[in-house]
Image (tube, rainbow, N blue to C red):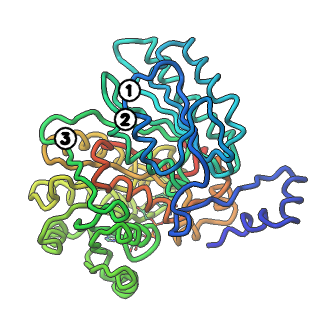
Amino acid sequence: MADRYLHLTGTAPGRFLTRRLGLPRPTPLLRWSPEIPRLDGALLHLTAGVPAVAGVAEVLDRVGLPVVGGSGRADRTAAIVLDATGVATAAGLGDVYAALHPVVRSLAPGGRVVVLGTVPSPADHHQAAAQQALEGFVRSLAKEIGRGATVQLVRVPGGGGTAEAAESTLRFLLSPRSAYVSGQVIEITAEAPGPGPVADPLTDPAAPLTGRTALVTGAARGIGAAVASVLARDGARVIALDVPGVREELARTADRLGATTLPLDITAPDAAERIAAAAPDGLGVLVHNAGITRDRRLANMPAGHWASVIEVNLDSVLRTTDELLKSGALTRGGRIVATASIAGIAGNTGQTNYAASKAGIIGLVRSLGPRAAADHGVTVNAVAPGFIETRMTAAVPLFIREAGRRLNSLSQGGLPVDVAEAVAWFARPDSAAVNGQVLRVCGQSLLGA
Ligand code: NAD
């Protein structure tokens, strides 16, 4: 469904009207395309205090933007990375202010700010306070920065770690692929015990999933179709799964991508076996995207509404994940990406069943991530979309729909491709140190923030 308001605010009369009425004025977001492969401008690399992590400059050099140091000047600043890993006291926070205060206004529209921190220490409450303070700082700056710019906090492993583990994350956040992600905190994991997730060298940086098979559930339309498309773009052999009832729509989507189809209800008792059979050489990426809503307030909710939502959105995800890991169908170095929702974080009237199922996904990811890495070399992460323009949200009544679109820091809904780009980042072979994370793709929605 078209966001007519966003188009209106791009016209001269629309700009005049919205300014006079004090209405939100969303900036159209620049998304990745072959014509817009990277941000337009320089990357300003700043530090606050003495960095506690090595290798940040080397990683930033590889991001693909010209890097300018603290004392340098750029005609156009597309991104600012502030290394605050060494901030360990309340007084040290003054260095964060001093670094960003003079330059934040010079950030180009649609620019990126990434603050690098470390995990708050359970053994040092001064360091923990200072590092946790960065979260409040980032979330606030993301709310006020405006003009389509985004702000994130990336926690890299301290204790002598290097920034290399965060490279795929920085590449994603400092690119047009993360246009609808803002106000997020991402924790890069330290070396996992056991075999650990595999970081394969990229054979082709433009097609990092070359040689991998990716299965996407609910792929006939909406977010699932976009995920299938982006994974195919990144080189994966895609298997598109959806219920037999939408076989034709599924075939049309798959044909466009050169994908194969698997018409299958994910709640079928033999779903895992059929998935494994469809990928005889093993699965490298499993994306649990299929989901349904059956909304009613709890007092009016038929038992069937409750049961079907839990079954499709959560139970089938748990079951197929367990079976595919156990059978080894998910190969070492594999990636599981599940789909939560901000409703699972904030709750929503009429959605006790849906929010429970999506919060359950968050529980699954946080618990299984470290164990799946240790036992199978597989990472487990989730995307939590906010308001995304799909058939699901087009069915929402007008006023609630408008509120959903505007009540976020970017004052607009996201597109299915925004979620798909986040899934593709989790799926990358070099995202081995991104595990157990839940990334909200919601433009920093006020709900549950
Ligand atoms: P959609 O309804 O457009 O597409 C969902 C797809 O899943 C459909 O093709 C459907 O046939 C398929 N599906 C449903 N039950 C299935 C089953 N039992 N087996 C196999 N396939 C099944 O929805 P969407 O908006 O694209 O949402 C995709 C996912 O993102 C869902 O998990 C949804 O809960 C989540 N999500 C969406 C939004 C949003 O704003 N659109 C927000 C938060 C979360």
Q: Quadrant of residue 160?
A: top left
The residue nearer to you, when weighing 1 against 105, is 105
Q: Quadrant of residue 365?
A: top left
> Mark 2 Cα within 10 Å, few/some/many (few <14, many 20+)?
many
The image shows residue 28, relative to residue 75, as above or below, that is: below
Q: Quadrant of the C terminus?
A: top right
> Mark 1 Cα within 10 Å, few/some/many (few <14, many 20+)?
many
The residue wearing badge 3 is: 371
* Residue 361: image location, x then y, percent: 34, 49
Q: Which mark is residue 362?
A: none
- Secondary element type, mark 1: loop
Q: Residue at x 45, y 51 (%)?
A: 172
* Residue 201: image location, x then y, percent: 24, 53
Mark 1 vs mark 3: give the one in front: 1
Disc 1 + disc 2, Cβ < 8 Å: yes
Residue type, label 1:
Val
The residue nearer to you, when weighing 318 against 299, is 318
The residue wearing badge 2 is: 163
> Mark 3 Cα within 10 Å, few/some/many (few <14, many 20+)?
some
